[in-house]
Image: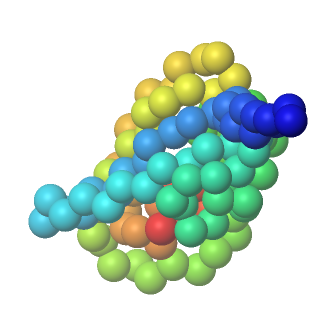
Amino acid sequence: MLALAAPPAQTPAASLMLSLQDGAGRVVTVSLDCHPAGGSHPGKTKACATLTTVDGDIERIPGEATVCPMIYSPTTATAKGHWRGKPVVYTHTFGNKCAAAAESGGVFEF
């Protein structure tokens, strides 16, 4: 009898740890894997699609036309990891959580 081994798990081409920190210091962190999509990010498919259009360069994301409340509540977004072999290190402070989600095309929508 020949035993068949399970195929090796596919290693994602991109793996990021994403964090949002509010002005009170509370931090929420999720993981995001792309190609294939995975991780704990609630909108992983959309986030990976957005990142794919800019080859993982978060600075180049055009953002979405979204109406956000004009309530200043600084939110710092951070991304660390790799995208197709390139290191990703990103930090930016947005006016509030809604702006972080909209301006990142859903990457920081969690």
Q: Residue furthest left?
A: 24
Residue 56 seen: no
Residue 79 horizontal side relative to residue 4, left or right: left
* Residue at x-position 64% and y-position 28%: 83
Picture layout, residue 20 above or below residue 66 = above
* Residue at x-position 44% and y-position 82%: 69
Where residue 61 sits: x, y (%)? 67, 45
From the viewer's side, name the closer residue of 25 and 41: 41
**Count of marks placed on residues:** 0
Q: Residue furthest front?
A: 1
Residue 21 horizontal side relative to residue 55, left or right: left
* Residue at x-position 61% and y-position 44%: 33
From the viewer's side, name the closer residue of 48 and 31: 31
Residue 70 seen: yes
From the viewer's side, name the closer residue of 27 and 67: 27
Residue 22 horizontal side relative to residue 90, left or right: left
Where residue 41 sits: x, y (%)? 54, 60
Picture layout, residue 66 above or below residue 78 = below
Q: How is the image coloured?
A: rainbow
In the picture, residue 2 is in which quadrant?
top right
Picture layout, residue 109 above or below residue 21 = below
* Residue at x-position 43% and y-position 33%: 80
Where residue 81 sits: x, y (%)? 49, 30
Where residue 21 sits: x, y (%)? 27, 57
Looking at the rendering, in which quadrant would you find the N terminus? top right
Residue 92 horizontal side relative to residue 85, left or right: left
Picture layout, residue 97 above or below residue 61 = below
